[in-house]
Image (cartoon, rainbow, N blue to C red):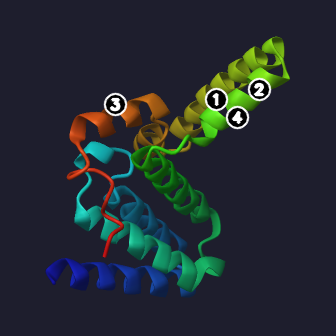
């Protein structure tokens, strides 16, 4: 109950800040909600983190036109949530599907694509570190392999089944 009240207040404050175009305050609230989801550390996720994700999506739906550049964090959280859901359900992830398609197309092209992906990931992490959001951007840049190992080590009871009502 207390968590629901706190998250409702956080949602309301974020919506008010966004609608009044107080960008610094809006940014603080949105980034805080993103960090509270703990999507960067799936082994430590609990129900409260899933509820924080739900609040983040609710804020995005209510005041999406006023989020500005904070949409990047919201979309990263949504993308990470989807990836964790795919891993938890045993479905192949996008990386596996695209790698399989690249291997069918030809050997050299897929190796070049993999190298380009590695370089773009490293460049994105370096850009994020220079932009002042080093900690949150670095944690969001965890590799798929580390997410899988964290999930396998944590067990499903502590992991990713928080979406159930």
Q: Residue 128, position in %: x, y?
A: 55, 40
Which residue has dot 2 on it? 102
What is the tally of numbered marks visible in this picture?
A: 4
Which residue has dot 1 on it? 123
Q: Residue 161, position in %: x, y?
A: 31, 59
Single out the mark in the foreground, 2 or 1.
2
- Is residue 23 depicted above or below 21 in this figure? above
Secondary structure under badge 3? helix
Tell which residue pokes out farthest to the top in this image.
108
User: Callout 3: 10 Å neighbours few (<14), some, many (20+)?
Assistant: few
Asked if the residue under mark 2 is in contact with the one under mark 4, i.e. CB atoms within 8 Å, the reply is yes
Measured in 3D between alpha carbons, the distance from the residue under mark 1 to the one under mark 3, in whole angstroms, is 25 Å
Q: Earlier in the sequence, mark 2 or mark 3?
A: 2
Q: Earlier in the sequence, mark 4 or mark 3?
A: 4
For this view, does 26 lie left or right of residue 47?
A: right
Split into 4 quadrants, where in the image is the N terminus? bottom left
Asked if the residue under mark 3 is in contact with the one under mark 1, i.e. CB atoms within 8 Å, the reply is no
Q: Is residue 123 visible?
A: yes
Q: Residue 37, position in %: x, y?
A: 35, 59
Measured in 3D between alpha carbons, the distance from the residue under mark 2 to the one under mark 1, in whole angstroms, is 22 Å
- Is residue 145 depicted above or below 13 in this figure? above
Q: Earlier in the sequence, mark 4 or mark 1?
A: 4
Q: Residue drawn at (61%, 31%), measured in percent from left and top?
A: 121
User: Callout 4: 10 Å neighbours few (<14), some, many (20+)?
Assistant: few
Q: Earlier in the sequence, mark 2 or mark 1?
A: 2
Q: Residue drawn at (36%, 56%), measured in percent from left and top?
A: 35
Quadrant hosting residue 29: bottom left
Which residue has dot 4 on it? 98
């Amino acid at each position: 109950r207390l968590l629901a009240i706190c998250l409702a207040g956080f949602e309301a404050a974020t919506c008010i800040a966004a609608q009044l175009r107080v960008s610094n305050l809006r940014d603080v609230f949105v980034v805080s909600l993103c960090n509270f989801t703990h999507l960067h550390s799936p082994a430590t996720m609990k129900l409260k983190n899933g509820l924080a994700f739900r609040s983040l999506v609710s804020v995005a739906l209510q005041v999406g036109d006023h989020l500005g550049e904070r949409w990047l964090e919201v979309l990263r959280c949504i993308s990470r949530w989807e990836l964790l859901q795919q891993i938890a359900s045993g479905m192949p992830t996008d990386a596996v599907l695209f790698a399989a398609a690249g291997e069918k197309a030809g050997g050299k092209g897929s190796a070049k694509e993999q190298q380009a992906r590695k370089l773009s990931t490293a460049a994105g992490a370096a850009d994020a570190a220079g932009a002042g959001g080093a900690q949150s951007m670095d944690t969001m840049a965890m590799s798929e392999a580390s997410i899988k190992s964290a999930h396998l080590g944590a067990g499903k009871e502590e992991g990713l089944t928080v979406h159930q009502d």
